[in-house]
Every structure is written in structure tokens, then in C-alpha cells.
Image (cartoon, rainbow, N blue to C red):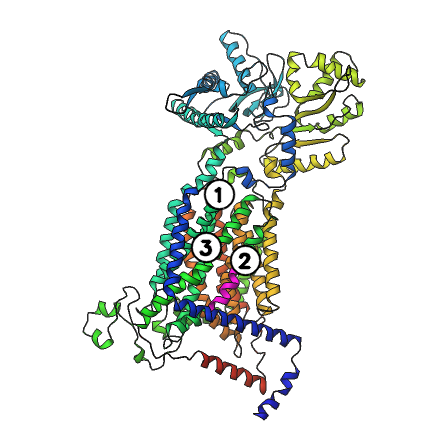
Amino acid sequence: MVGGVSGHSGRWERLEPRPRARMLRQVLHAGLRSSFHALGRFVASHPVFFASAPVLLSILLGASFSRYRVEENVEYLLAPKHSLAKIEGNLVDSLFPVNRSKHALYSDLQTPGRYGRVIVTTRKGSVLDQLHLDTILKLHRRIYQMQVTVPATGLNSFNYSFSYLCLPDDKNICIIDDIIRAMEEIQSARASNRSAPVLRYPITRLADGRQAYIGHQLGGVQGWGPGGAVRGPGTGARGEGVRSARALQLTYYLQARGGLMDRVAGQWEKAFCAELQHFAALHPKLGLYPSTSSSLRTDFQFSSVLARRPLLASLGVCSVLAVLCCSMRDCVRSKPWLGLLALLSITLSGLTAAGILNLTGATYNSTYLGIPFIMLGHGLFGSFEILSSWRRTREDQHVKERVAGVFEDVMLRFSGSTMLHLMTLGLAASPLTNMEAVRLFCRTAALAVTVSYVYTLSFYSSCLVFTGYLETGYRHGCFCRRVPKPDRLDSKPAWYRCLMYTRYQEETHSQTANPPHGDSHLLLGCVRRCYGDWITNTYVKPFVVLLYLVYISFGLMGFLQVTQGSDPSALVAMDTATVLYARAQQRYFSSYSPVIGFYIYESAPYWNASVQRDLLEYAKGFQRISWLESYLNYLSERNQSTSQSRENFTRTLRHSFLREPQYAHFSDDIIFAERGQGEEPDVAASRVFLVAKTTENKREEMSVLLDTLRRLSLTSRVRFLIFNPSFVYLDRYAAAVSSPLRHSLLAVLFLLGLSSLAVVEPLVSVWLGLTLLSVQFGVLGFMTLWGVELDCMSVLCLISALGHSADCSGPLLCGFASGRGESRTRWVRVALERHGVPSLQTLLCYSAALVPVGCVRSNLTHTLFRCLTLTAGCSALHTLAFLPTLLTFLPPSKARGHRPGGEGLRQEVECVEMNDSTRVVDQITTV
């Protein structure tokens, strides 16, 4: 004994900081494993309670679905929460509210709370042809005269027409689009055999002399060029005559004053869509594409309706594969019911999480379709890891000891992966996230993962206890019937012997944790006998390394082509009104940008010549509807100087210019502020409308234009801002979408670095961090190559990919790093057998569950399917190919710790003690 101590004295002297850190990790590991061992014994001692409590809790919380509410504000979900565009929009609404406009409205700039909009296209010819023009005006009159009854039945029912709901002008007449007035002038001229007035594009002049912008009302325009040549669509210059047009857009503005009028306006929108559908059936030569204020909300939530049956199909397919993954040839050791019970545990946890959300007043939206797959991947990983560890325990132990050993072996890794999930989702759900859809999704997913973790420890583990007692009593794993002994099976038919095949304890004197190859699980046998030797073969490794280089190359190719997806219509169901309308608008109305409001929100010296030059210079290059430019031309035509005193400039503006009929509509664009008594008021604020020439990439060009004009506003001496409702989605969208992903990735790396100091081997943390980065990089690159843009849904999938890849690769790395004393290749094979098979089972069930979702006709579910499929594929490549190959020749080394003398003796003693500690034989082996 004394000699043994003196033999180790040199080793005690070498306990420097690095061995101390290793000793601290060993102490923490031992404490955590002992805690989970005690927890496993406690669960195994009270299986009925832990099996029934989650079921009862889920039923109670599931009754709260009467409080189910859907989020109806799509802008609240998909637009950046804190952006300058929202502040600018509020300022614009306070200065120039929609109800204040008494002459004209621009449908893509000033959109009131309720509206109906339709794009009319022709199959052949032009919408300005006499036949089509008469048909369109007939449609306009039918919409104008359409009535809705609210309430539908009862004595208090009233009929409401468009003339009651519309926004009135200064003559108390409904505001309609200028193109309707132009078409009525053309129809009147044709009826009286007069020459039709020339319709110019994009700015035309009406019969009252007023200039009107019709670029967003007339689409697919061909104009007469010089010498009679026909210009291409939308290429006409200002003042050019229109030869033909393929599309027409009409907007009907409604006002909703109070709850009753809002309900009436909602009913009018439904009647509007029904009327257009009926009219399209009567006139097949026209194509009608309607859109209302509620179309985006309805079509966004319609993805959830379309995905109901596919989600049930996913559950069914996953159930079949889970049963197969838990089955073996040995009917006693086979656990098919555990596959179904694992899915039942996930379903109960989802029901509980939904009940908690209902009770807390949370709302639902279609992005939540991704949460079941996060729960499925994480829950199945834990279930298959528990089952794999159960099959490695000694069969001569009592069920309680076996369950305690499973908890001691698995729950530390499972808890670590759950912490990674919660870290990534929790930080993305924090106030640092600037997009509400991402924040709500991650908050709900974190709750669901937490409940799923608790139910795995309680419900699923108690089910494992029950199946363990069935196994101890030699009962059939599927039918729960006691299996006869071999001497009694000999007289049975062959099919019965095959169905009841098992190994009795007395057949093998000392059963080890690993059964014979013929009795092991099919996937385990394939990995043990074939795949493990093949992937670690010296001649295969170069090809795997080459495959990884190809993987990185294609990932980089896609990474350099990442594009933003800020268009909300890309997240709605296919073949819906929103998508069809957006396609028609992109096809026929992409020549010009939406109308941009140029708002001067402070008093400026408009009479100053230099200020006039600056404002005209800012608007140069745009198609514009400008009161200032028209006023300066008005002064020049009357031989008056444009540079006047403030009093003369304002007096002429108010008493001469704005009283002319062709300029009266500019009174909506100017706000006067009174000064002293007897003094001319100041121009406190004004607005100018700008339209830019665009190409097919309208949203990208609008984003560039927004940044350019904003930078110009910082250096201008005239305080102005620009606004369009689409800026709410464009402004800071890239930062709002990508910041949750960056925060989650940094949080994971920080957690791995912190845990390497006390809990995890440092090299395991390094390898896991590199694996997460590699998977994330690959998913992002291949996602772009597959045509997926970086939008709200794809970012949510990328955030969940961090946890999913940690689930798959973390146990493999921990299993490899924990091995000592043999070659790298040997421990790679052992890690594949122990942890690669559960990861493979999880990936098979997870991928099969994604297939039905890919068939849903929805842009949102297509993005979800592609991103999650890439996540599963990249995780499988790293877990089953890249890591097993790279670990055979990269650190951590397996040679350390194998030193002659005391160190080797210490390791050998620890190994013997560990084996003895698990050799606890309980005499009561049957129940």
C-alpha cells in the first residue's frame, strides 16, 4: 500500500492548472451523473404518477382552446418593429391623413384601412378598345351600385352601398381613380362621334385641365414613338400618347368609422370579391385579379388551414418509421410501442404548450407550423438515445437500476442539447430581436422544447419502466403476451416460432450489454458490421475529405448569392388572391415604382430661388406631381418672377393659383400655418409625389432609392422625408432578419466556450462549435441555390438548425472524446454504434415527416420544407460522414493518458471500478 502511494507521488506533483480543470470537470460530471441516477431511480419507483400526470395536465390545458386567437395584423408580424419608416409613416398620417385628401388618392401611397382593388387584363387586344372599355365601365357601375346587408337578417338590417362607405371629395362625391374619368371621356367622345381625347402616359391631362398620374392605373402600355414607331411596354416618355394597354387597375377606397362601419366594410370586401368572381365567369375575355385590405391576412393564415391534413399525414408516416426503428427480431427486447409513445409524448407536450399560450392570451400565426418539427427532432433524438442506452444495460439488473443507469448515461447529454436549444431560441426571443414574427416563434418554440424535455424525463421514461417490466417477465414487446420457452415452441408452426422468437437468460450464461449480431437492431448491425468499417477505411477517407471540400465550395457559392425576401406575398399560400394579384402587378405595373411621397415637414423659404433650385434638383429624374413646379410654371406663364417676397409668394399661391380649377387639387398637398393678424400665413408643410423608373427588381431598387434619399435628407437645408407603405417592410429588413441568427450563433459559441471550462472537454466544445458553423453555412448556401430567400421563415429554420445539428453531432463527439486507451478508429466505430444509430433513426423519421409538408401549396411551407430538409441532410452528412472521417486523424488524441507506470495503473483501476459499479444483480428479476 505504501509502495503504491510512493509510486504515484510524481503524478501528484504534476497537478498544474490543466489537470485541475480536468479534475473539476470529472467532479462536476460525477455530481451530475449521480443526480440523474437518483432522478432515474425516483421515476422508476413512481411510474404511474409520471405517466398519468402529463396526460391529465395536457387534457386540462387542451380545454383552453376556446381562447384560441389568430394574429390578424400581418405588418405587426413581418415588418421590422423599430424602424425609421414607421416613425415617418406616423408623421405623414398626422400631417396628411387620408380623410383630408378631397381630390385624388394614389392607391400605392395612401391606403386607408379598408379598400377593394382589382387588376383587369385582356386575353387579346387592349383594355382601351371599345368593347373592353365598355365592359370595364360596366363593371365599375356594378361595383358602385353593389349593396351589402348588415346584419344579414332581422328587423334592424340596413343596406349599404359604396356611395355610403366611400371617401368623399370636396363636393361630397366618392373619390374614384383618374383613369375612370379618362375612360368615361373616351366613351363619351366615341358615342358622340367626336375624336377621342389623347390619353398620355404616365401623366395625362383630364378634361378639367388637371394633370393626373396614371402610371399605377394603366399597365402594359405601348406608346407611339417618333415616326409612328411603337415603343416597348412602359417606355413612353412624359406626354407620349398611349397606343394600347394590356392591364388596368382600379381601387375603391372605403372609410371605417367605428366598429359597425368596419364590420360593414369587411362585408363589402367579401361581396366585392364575389361580384368580381361572378363577373369574370360572364366575361371570359377579361382576367380579374382582386385584392382587399384583408387578402394578405387571410392568405397568410390560409397556409395553416392547408397544412392540417399534411401534418396528420406526417405524424402517421413518422409513427410507422418510429415503430420500425424501435423493433428488433427478438420479440421480447423489441420495443415498438416506445416508438408510438415517443410521438405521443411529443404530442402531449405540444398540447400542453398550446394550452399555456391560450391561457396567457398569446396569438397564433402560420409561422408556428415549424414548431412541431423542432419538437419532433429534439424529442425523437432523446427517445432513441434513451432506448439505445437501455439496450446497452445489463439484463440481469432490476428495472429500477437499468432506468437509473440510462438516466446517468443519457440525460447529461440530452440536457446539454436542450440547453443549446433554449439558448438559441431564448436569445432570438429577447427584445434584441426587431421582428415580431421571429420573436413570437422563438418564444413559443422555447416553451415547447422545455415542456418536451420535461415530458421525456417523466412520461416517456415511465413508459420505458413499464416496457422494462414486460421484458423482465419475457412478454411479447407488441402483444404483451408471455413468450413460451424454446422447448414449448418446437411444437408450434414456423410462423408462430418466428413471431415469438427470443433469447432466454439461461441460454447465454452471462449476457453482456451487446447482444449477438443476429439479435441486434437492423441499423445497429449494419453500422457495426459494414458502415463503421467502411467509413473509417483508409481508401475512403480521401473521398470523404474531397466531398467536404465540394460541400464547402457549393455552400460558399450560395452564400455569396444570398438575397433578401422582404415581400410579404412570398409567405402566403399559392394560388390565392394575394399571389395572383402580385404576379399581375409585377407583370404589368413594374415599369414604374410606387408613388413616393416627398414630405417637407418644416416651414421652408419656398420663395427663395436657391431653395427652389434645390427642390427641383431633388425631383429631377423622377416622374412627378409637384405643386411647386406647377406653381413656378404658373408664375412664369404670367411673366411674374418666381423669386418674390414671402407675402407676395404666399398671397398669389392662395388666392390665385389654388383657385384655378386645374390646380385646385394641390390644396390637399399644402398646410398653411397662421401668423399674426393681417399677415399672410406660412407654408408649414407640403408634399410632392415622385415616381421612379424601375426594372424587374423593383423592391431592390426601392431599397437603394430609400437609402439614397435618406442620405440626401441629412445634408439638405430643407427638412424632408420620403415615405411609401412598402418602406415599412424594406427599412432595416436585412438587419432585422439576420440579427436573431447572429445573436443565437454567438450565444451558442459562448455557451460552448463557457461549458468547456467546467463541464465539457474543451476539444468537444471546439468540434461542436465548428460543426454548428459548418452546418449553418451549408444550409444557408444550399438554401440560396435552391431558390429560397433570406426572409422571416428561412431565418427561423436557420435558428432551429443550430439545435438540430447539436442534437445529431453532440453525442457522437462526446462518445468519441470520452474513450481512452485505443486507436481513434476503434473509438469512432464505438461512437457510431452507440450514438450514430440514434441520430440516424431520428433523421429518418424526421425526413419522412417532412415529405407531406412539401406537398402543401404554400410559399411558406415550401420554404419550411426546403430549409428543414437541408438541415436534416447537412446534419446527417456531418454526423455520419464528415466527423467520423476527420476524427480519425485530427485531435483529440487517444494516446494521452497511456503512460507507463502509475498513470496507466490509475486508468486500469478506474475502469475496473466502473465495471464493478454497474454489476449490481437484483435477485428479484421477475414481477
The reply to whether dot 2 and dot 1 touch (C-beta < 8 Å) is: no
Amino acid type indicated by mark 2: Val
Count of marks placed on residues: 3
Residues shaded magenta: 409-421
Spatial CA span between label 2 and label 1:
32 Å
Q: Are marks 1 and 3 in contact (CB under 8 Å)?
A: no
As helix, strand or loop, the secondary structure at mark 1 comes to: loop
Magenta span contains residue 416:
yes
Q: Quadrant of residue 565?
A: top right
What amino acid is found at the position of numbered circle 3 in the picture? Met
**Image height check: is 3 above or below 384?**
below
Q: Can residue 543 be seen at all in this image of the molecule?
A: no
Q: Main secondary structure of the magenta part?
A: helix
Residue 889 among those drawn in magenta:
no
Pointers 3 and 2 in contact (C-beta within 8 Å): no
Q: Position of residue 40 (x, y in %)?
A: 44, 69
Q: Is residue 511 left or right of residue 819?
A: left
Closer to viewer: mark 3 or mark 2: 3
Q: Does the rendering let one see residue 428?
A: yes
In the figure, residue 462 lies in which quadrant? bottom left
Residue 137 horizontal side relative to residue 474, left or right:
right
Q: Is residue 194 above or below residue 410?
A: above
- Looking at the image, is mark 3 or mark 2 earlier in the sequence? 3
The residue labelled by disc 1 is 363
Image quarter (top left, top right, bottom left or bottom right) of the N terminus: bottom right
The label on residue 775 is: 2
**Which circle's residue, 1 or 3, is located before the other in the chain?**
1
Rounded to the nearest whole Å, what is the CA distance between mark 1 and mark 3? Answer: 19 Å
Q: Residues within 10 Å of mark 1 (few under 14, many from 20)?
A: some
Name the residue rendered at 26%, 71% in the picture. 483
Quote the CA–CA distance across marks 3 and 2: 19 Å
